[in-house]
Image (cartoon, rainbow, N blue to C red):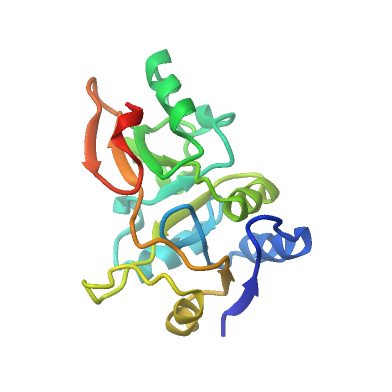
Amino acid sequence: MAEFIKIYEENPNPKEIKKIVDVLKRGGLIIYPTDTVYGLGCDITNNKALERIARIKNVKLEKANFSFICYDLSNLSDYVKQIDTSTFKILKRALPGPYTFILPGAKTLPSAFKKKKTVGIRVPDNRIALEIVKALGNPIVSTSIRDEDEVLEYTTDPELIHEKWDNLVDLVVDGGYGDNLASTVIDFSEDQPVIVREGKGSLEIF
């Protein structure tokens, strides 16, 4: 049975944030709000938790395209090869925001991702997500929770999410209704940026 915690984005309760971080540190899986759709996440340093997410998503961990949810860009070099100034300026301008940037992976990636040539970096504009990552001290590995119903595609009601995922995860964070539009994904791993998916984030920023 997954725990269900209500948190208000305007003023996230530090005690509740700590409770969520404790679950992550124990290798638990959480569902939490972002500035787009609700995400399924775990501690980037916990391989058992990563394997659990891969099993739920029915993919091999080494082939999974999960995003790294970061608090800001200050530790980017731990996960990403050096990027040029113009790319970094775009990231600074767009984040926090509803974007996923695909960037070349660094040699210092955690062991589960050593073979990855690229990684997806997210800094969502959502205080709950950011406070969780800040308190954890390293990124969350995350993937969107999709619905089998193609019309719905993304469930937005936290109570329905809790009902559906109750036996699969350890904790569901109710941060209010989520969006049903995913992040805009832009690949900056080659010479020219490529729009992989047009989502909530406006392309005018580029």
Residue at 51% x, 63% y: name it: 49
Residue at 25% x, 27% y: name it: 193
Check the image and report above or below for 84 versus 36.
Answer: above
Residue 81 lies, in percent from the top left, at 42, 25
Instruction: Using the image as rendered, state which of residue 96 and residue 18 is in the foreground.
Output: 96
Check the image and report above or below for 187 versus 190.
Answer: below
Residue 188 lies, in percent from the top left, at 30, 29
Quarter where residue 173 is shown = bottom right
Residue 83 lies, in percent from the top left, at 40, 20
In-image side of 36 versus 188 (left or right): right
Can residue 114 be seen in the rendering of this structure? Answer: no
Check the image and report above or below for 78 versus 149.
Answer: above
For this orientation, the residue located farthest to the right is 15
Quarter where residue 138 is shown = top right
Residue at 65% x, 63% y: name it: 8
Residue 60 lies, in percent from the top left, at 31, 59
Can residue 182 be seen in the rendering of this structure? Answer: yes
* Quadrant for the N terminus in the image: bottom right
Check the image and report above or below for 12 versus 79.
Answer: below
Instruction: Using the image as rendered, state which of residue 182 and residue 102 is in the foreground.
Output: 182
